[in-house]
Amino acid sequence: MENKIQIVVGTSNPHKVEEFNEIAQNSNIEFIPLDCKNFEPDENGKTFEENAEIKAKEACRVSNFGKYFLADDSGLCVDFLNGAPGIHSARYEKTPERRINKLLSEMKNSDKRSAHFVCALCLVDENGKVLHIEKGKVYGEIIEETRGNGGFGYDPIFLIKNLNKTMAELTRHEKNTLSHRGQALKHMIEWMSNSLN
Ligand code: ITT
């Protein structure tokens, strides 16, 4: 069997690596979590792309092995809140439940419910040089109560309108097909398969 190209993923969110490997299933790419306790990137960028680059470079700096390093910066942008929580999605409140409750209370009585998820991916080489960046988006609506147990983060309140399901009610395969991360990673894997060895 052909050897897969191994990519170290700079993240402390295990859900991301799981989704990456599900999406990469039929490719020649394999994602490996960063095996390092001191991964503490200073996410002080102004955009998802800048923060993805900061994380990928930090993964490269602290990892003891690996040739390629990938990082994901993602978040939920709500139109009624002028794009918040955006790049601050993970830090909006302490736990996923509290983040959802805060968002729902800030949107109370608003009938403008449109929102989108964004995912920026950055790949660097072993010298920390940026090789490729991809971005994906998915549009939906914030509903007033949580629905579904799948996915993670804000998935239970993010409705995909044409399916009438939240991201947490989708199968893993359905989420990966249409999600911001799924779209960005599909293009990243295509690029990797054609450009890396
Ligand atoms: P790393 O920085 O270590 O990768 P993180 O979870 O802190 O992990 P981000 O800074 O990119 O990652 O923040 C992403 C947050 O945006 C995440 O914690 C969720 O709250 C939200 N988010 C991103 N993708 C999501 C998805 O597919 N479904 C639901 N929420 C998502």
Image (tube, rainbow, N blue to C red):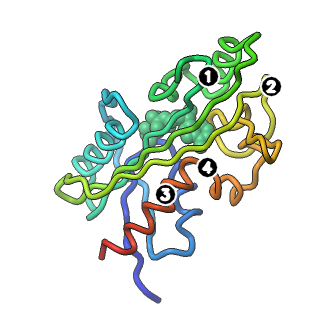
Q: Is residue 20 above or below residue 191?
A: above
Q: Are marks 2 and 4 in contact (CB under 8 Å)?
A: no
User: Mark 4 — residue?
Assistant: 179
In this view, the residue in front, 110 or 23, is 110
> Is label 4's Cβ within 8 Å of ligand 1?
yes
Instruction: Determine if the C-beta at disc 1 is less than 8 A from ligand 1.
Output: yes
Q: Which residue is mark 1?
A: 99
184 above or below 115?
Answer: below
- Secondary-structure class at tag 3: helix
Q: Residue 117, percent across and down? A: 57, 38
Give the Cα distance between marks 2 and 3.
29 Å
Q: Please tell me how crowded label 1 is: few (under 14), some (14-19), or many (20+) other residues with Cα within 10 Å.
A: some
Residue 133, given in percent of the width and then of the height, sits at: 35, 52
Q: Earlier in the sequence, mark 4 or mark 1?
A: 1
> Residue 73, how many percent across, how many down?
43, 40
Q: Is residue 41 left or right of residue 73?
A: left
Q: Which residue is mark 3?
A: 185
Alpha carbon distance from label 2 to label 1: 13 Å
Which is nearer the N-term, disc 3 or disc 4? 4
Q: Which mark is residue 145?
A: 2
Q: Secondary structure at mark 2?
A: loop
- Kind of residue at disc 1: Arg
